[in-house]
Amino acid sequence: MVKYFFTAEGGRMEASENFKKNCWVDMVNPTDDECEDVANITGVPEDMIKAALDEEERARSEFDEGCSMFVVDCPIIEEGASGDSYTTLPLAIIYNKNCIVTVCLKGNTVLKDFITGREKVKSEMPVHFTLTFMLGNAKRFLYCLKQIDRKNHRIQNEMGKTMRNEEIIQLLDLQNSLVFFSTSLTSNERVHEKFSKIEAVTTHEDYQDLYDDLSIENKQAIETCNIYKNILSVTMDAYGSVISNNANNNMKTLTIITILLAVPTMIAGFWGMNMPVPGENGVTFAQTGWFWLVTAVAVILTACIAVVLLKGNPFKHPIKQKKRKKHEKPDRKNK
């Protein structure tokens, strides 16, 4: 999809059906034919236009044939069955003496603010347009990081009540998102530094102030992302320890039950076939004395082992510690 915008009177951004000089060409997931048409109209090389159509494209800058291209990573919020997920997509800003061209696979929130007028930009000022977009993109990263932190706290509260696999998978997704954000912010910072060295920025005081704001916002986003990433990593390790501890407790309980059942099973195996039991044909009650003796021994041994395993050895008395007497210091008499 290709749309054309230009700055009208009052600084408002208005749409246009056809290409105009000093306009802004917004391309969202364009086809090959659209890329070819825009390249012929604007004079921008087609390979530059298609650069941001690769999801794996890294943030970079390129200057060729009078065109300047800056590819930056942008945060994207995607809705899924298990909730919102956060990732990044490359977006290319290309400008020459004729127009500004933006290319991305999906719609961008910062560019929507340009269209609606929430953020004032001018299509005939490509450097100001690019700096304003980069600043808005850094703020968008901060917004997504806050949303990730809120979602992290909500998941932790749920895991405090019931620990399920769904919450653990959601935390893993958030950790992956923070890794993507950290890598993208670092790559964007290198592009910002290259952009700050072009002549239009170094010789314009307003652009310098705008770049300083951009640098501050991007560094804050990097620091915030690293903090959240470390916190989430520690949280995942803590929950891993809790799960391991719970598994150990369950194994301990199963081991105790197995040992308790093994004692009467072992005794019954040794004696069950070599003695008369109650209810056997021709056996009187007096002849089953050994059966009751063996049964009583099994029950007593099982009870003793249960006490030892569950509460410790009851026959071992704790060592009594001698109470230390507090010696009072003698009063010193004044001589």
Image (tube, rainbow, N blue to C red):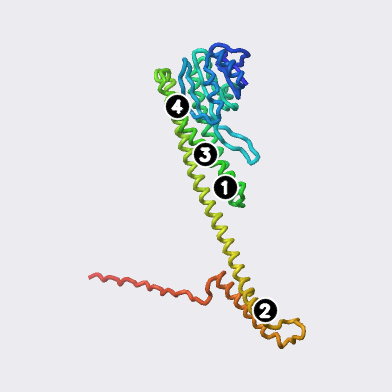
Q: Quadrant of residue 327?
A: bottom left
Q: Secondary structure at mark 2?
A: loop
Mark linked to residue 272: 2
User: What residue type is disc 1 on?
Assistant: Gln
Residue 2: x percent and y percent? Answer: 61, 19
Q: Say whether marks 2 and 4 touch (CB < 8 Å).
A: no
**Dot 4 or dot 3, earlier in sequence:** 3
Q: Residues within 10 Å of mark 3 (few under 14, many from 20)?
A: many
Which residue is outermost to the front?
A: 273
Q: Are marks 3 and 1 in contact (CB under 8 Å)?
A: no
Sequence-wise, which precedes: disc 2 or disc 4? Answer: 4
Hey, which residue is sitting farthest right in the picture? 281
- The amino acid type of the residue labelled 2 equals Gly
The amino acid type found where label 3 is placed reads Leu
The reply, left or right, for residue 214 in relation to residue 172 is left
Q: Is residue 60 left or right of residue 158?
A: left
Q: Where in the figure is residue 233, as x and y percent of width and height? A: 50, 46
The residue drawn where x is 27% and y is 70% is 332
Mark 3 lies on residue:
178
Q: Nearer the viewer, mark 3 or mark 1?
A: 3
Q: Amino acid at mark 4?
A: His
Q: In this view of the protein, can residue 213 be seen by the observer? A: no
Q: Which residue is mark 4?
A: 192
Which comes before the other along the chain, label 1 or label 4?
1
Q: Earlier in the sequence, mark 2 or mark 1?
A: 1
In front: label 2 or label 3: 2
